[in-house]
Amino acid sequence: MRPPIEKEGHLRIRRDILKHARERMGLDQEALAEAVCLKSWHINQIEDTEDHYYFYTNALKINAVKKIGKYLELDESSFLY
């Protein structure tokens, strides 16, 4: 088991896990965005790139990803490393 990472900015996202979970729940990006109070372009950026342009910082992106993961009923360790 690896030690916990102290700063959220160092976490990496398993975009494929989030995308598959969203699709398994029958949601498109727009529906998921509405459910978690984001815009569909936020979901698109999370699933398709490591950039954080729409989030201003990677830490804000990680917070959004955690919110999405919770909504999709995922354990954080399955989509963040």
Image: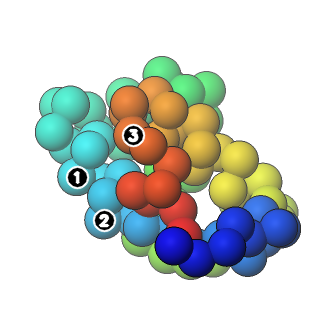
Density class for disc 1 (Cα within 10 Å; few <14, some 14-19, many ≥20) is few
Viewer-proximal residue among 73 and 65: 73
In the visual, does 3 lie left or right of 74? Answer: right
Q: In which quarter of the image is residue 29?
A: top left
**x, y (%) of residue 6?**
82, 67
Density class for disc 2 (Cα within 10 Å; few <14, some 14-19, many ≥20) is few
Label 3 vs label 2, nearer the camera: 3
Tell me the amino acid under the disc marked 2.
Answer: Asp
Picture layout, residue 47 above or below residue 3: above
Instruction: Give the residue drawn at x 71%, y 47%.
Output: 63
Label 3 to label 2: alpha-carbon separation = 13 Å
Q: Which residue matches tag 3?
A: 74
- For the residues labelled 1 and 3, say whether their Cβ atoms are less than 8 Å apart: no
Helix, strand or loop at label 3? It is: loop
Helix, strand or loop at label 1? It is: helix
Instruction: Give the residue drawn at x 48%, y 56%.
Output: 77
- For the residues labelled 1 and 2, say whether their Cβ atoms are less than 8 Å apart: yes
Viewer-proximal residue among 63 and 32: 63
In the visual, does 1 lie left or right of 30? Answer: right
**x, y (%) of residue 78?**
40, 56
Label 1 to label 3: alpha-carbon separation = 11 Å
Tell me the amino acid under the disc marked 1.
Answer: His
Tell me the amino acid under the disc marked 3.
Answer: Leu
Helix, strand or loop at label 2? It is: helix
Question: How many numbered marks have been drawn onto this rendered protein structure?
Answer: 3
Q: Which residue matches tag 1?
A: 20
Query: In this view of the protein, can residue 80 be seen by the observer?
Result: yes
Q: Which mark is on residue 16? A: 2
Q: Quadrant of the C terminus?
A: bottom right
Picture layout, residue 52 above or below residue 33: below
Label 1 to label 2: alpha-carbon separation = 6 Å
